[in-house]
Amino acid sequence: MTTLSPILNADPAVCSSENAARKMIMGSPKPSGPFKVHTSFSAHTGARREVGKGSWPEVSLENPGGSSKLKNLSFHLESFITIHDSWTAEKKRRIGSDVTELLQCLEQAVLEDALRSPKVQVAQNNSVLAFETRVISNCSQENGNTRLEAQNNSVKISCMDIICSNTQGPSAVAFLSYVSLGTIINASFFEENHGKKSYGIYLNSQVVSTAIGPQQSESSSFSVLLSFQHIQKKNTEERSLCVYWKALGEEGGVWSKDHCNLNKSNETHTSCSCTHLSTFAVLMAPKSQEEDCVLTVLTFVGLSLSLLCLFLAALTFLLCRTIQNTSTSLHLQLSLCLFLADLLFLIGIKQAKNQVLCSIIAGLLHYFYLASFTWMLLEGLHLFLTARNLMVVNYSRVSQSMKKVMYPLGYGIPAVIVAISAASRADLYGTSSHCWLQLNKGFLWAFLGPVCTIVCVNFVFILLVLWILQSKLSSLNSEVSTLQDTRLLTFKALAQLCILGCTWCLGILQIGPAAWIMAYLFTIINSLQGVFIFLVYCLLNHQVQEQYKKWFMTIRQTKSRSESLVLSSNVVSGSTQTQTENQNEKLLSPNGQENPAH
């Protein structure tokens, strides 16, 4: 539908009211023979009333001609919009084809009416369609651009573009705005995402059409300036896309960005410039996040170091027998969850081309990071109970209770959250660029909600632990060693809280002028979580240090023994070789005597 000439030169029966009713309402051709349609709709509810067995919605059809034809086509458009909910996704191509034909017929009818009354500028508005037409015979200097408006949308087009190809009489220009057509040909018809997830893209304007008649050259190039009023205010995280309805014949139609450019956009309006006549609209899409190369490198390096440190920490917690207790078990599970989450993030966060795979990766990342925070919560609880047992000595009972419940809680709570999220909004796992949770409809709070709650609860635990220690220090002086161990544990828990809690707070605070500072802090600290865990719980632990020394000495002794064995074997082999050489020399000497030179 680049220009109107193929429409006006087509068989008039194509845009007759009878054919429009048959194609738009019934959705399929009627068998040959006498054809008559009677339909009616409830004016308030839009419900379809059946009349007789197998009857279609009733519409009173008159002989097409002038305003009567336009009136019937407008009613067909309303009927089409009303029943579109019963159309399944499999009929999408059929919907696109029928909408394309209906738009062409409406444009033709509006232009025909305008050319019948060339001295009258027409502007009409009803419940489904608003339009303005103008007939121009010649262009004066003050009439360089022609502006038409409908439903707070407008178009500007050069007067010379309107009349340049018509030498036989006046030319008409029409601007049509459709009230609810966007509910049918919505963002799911966007060419770049056709048949895929829209990922936050939606239609945010009325659908409008611009047409010129009676005839224009197919090769004509126009300068069409369009202004759209938004249906809802655009937020700062969205960008406007100027699109036109691209007819694909039997394949239907799609919204395409070709030959249309964005001039400017604010909260309430978007201005576009296009080089052809068609049907236009404005789509809203999330702003694409520009990659920061420095942040990307920091993330890759930090996560690589974390993976190495988490692997060493997990081996330490498994093999070091002197530190085997409930606290070590908690550290081990936390390290394993973070290791899997970081590894999956590193290799899978960008796998957005495969929708199913991306959704699975997003769900797994959701689970492993929630599991990490859940194990952190259990560590905070264990720390509080340990400090509390300084006053009430029942540590063994607490330790046994923790061992019984920590695995079901540590892996069960995140499993329940992810299961509920996936069951309710599985389509919001994965975005167009990253395999993570979408921002739409507050879905990200399925992750941020539990994380913020855990951080707050752990902060309360830390305050209670500090209060218990302060009370204990003020009343006791003899149990210094026990208190020193507890204070060391408290320091480590504070470090753990900063590593796993405050870093995510920095991520939430990436707003305003200091957003880039918060982004760098978040990236550096968060990507080095595994390094800090290995540092605090392994390298700064005296028992682990002693165990490392033993392992190092064992490796050194083993190496020394192997070197000694190699040296001994070399000496023996050297001695044997010397004896062999001496015997050979004796055999070579005359009369079996030794060579005097020796």
Image (cartoon, rainbow, N blue to C red):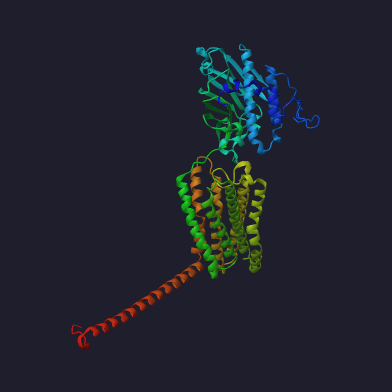
Q: Is residue 127 visible?
A: no
Asked whether 141 or 414 is in front, the reply is: 141
The extreme front residue here reads 33
Q: Is residue 123 shown above or below 314?
A: above
- What x and y, as percent, mark residue 3? 56, 23
491 left or right of 590?
right
Q: Is residue 590 above or below residue 409?
A: below
Q: Nearer the viewer, residue 116 or 433?
A: 116
Q: Can residue 165 be seen at all in this image of the molecule?
A: yes
- Residue 213 horizontal side relative to residue 299, left or right: right
Q: Residue at x 63, y 67 (%)?
A: 395
In which quadrant is the C terminus drawn? bottom left
Please state the horizontal and vertical placement of residue 74, each as a whole percent of the image: 68, 23
Name the residue at the right extreme. 52
Q: How many marks?
A: 0
Quadrant the N terminus occupies:
top right
Q: Nearer the viewer, residue 393 or 270?
A: 270
Would you place residue 468 above or below residue 156 in this image? below
Tell me where residue 466 sits by quadrant.
bottom right
Question: Which x, y percent locates residue 489?
Answer: 55, 62
Q: Residue at x 61, y 14 (%)?
A: 115
Give the quarter of the image for residue 149.
Answer: top right
Q: Position of residue 539 (x, y in %)?
A: 48, 63
